[in-house]
Image (cartoon, rainbow, N blue to C red):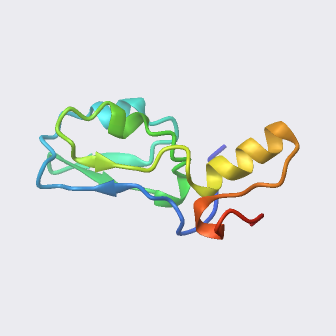
Amino acid sequence: MKHRYLKNVATLQVDESKCVGCGVCTEVCPHEVLELSMKKVQIRDRDACMECGACAMNCSFGAITVKAGVGCAYAIIKGSLTGSEPTCDCCSGKPC
């Protein structure tokens, strides 16, 4: 089953000029958001990104950035686990 989060809200960014095509980011991504194409990483499915930060944390070349733990997906998951209203940066600290 493919996990889906909120559309067009993930903070994931790729700087292809810094990518050396090692593929580590594709190996650590739990939802196959990234793929290698022509020896460079590409975002395959941005809306599947849960902003965990594993890709950026494991990129030795600084080609990937993501604001791990601050996105809408994180807010929804945290709200569900704690029984609270989900709040994220895009909603100015208010429930989404």
* Quarter of the image with the C terminus in it: bottom right
Where is residue 39? Give x, y as percent. 14, 45
The residue located at (21%, 42%) in the rendering is 62
Q: State whether residue 85 appears in this view.
A: yes
Q: Residue at x 42, y 34 (%)?
A: 54
**Residue 89 location, x and y as percent?**
59, 61
Q: Residue furthest front?
A: 93
> In terms of image quadrants, where is residue 12?
bottom left
Residue 61 position by quadrant = top left
Task: Answer whether residue 4 is visible to the viewer in this image.
Answer: no
What x and y, as percent, mark residue 36?
Answer: 26, 45
User: Image point 37% across, 30% down: which residue?
Assistant: 27
47 and 11: which one is in front? 11
Horizontal relation, residue 41 to residue 55: left or right: left
Q: Is residue 20 above or below residue 14?
A: above
Residue for point 50% across, 59% down: 10
Q: Is residue 61 above or below residue 95?
A: above
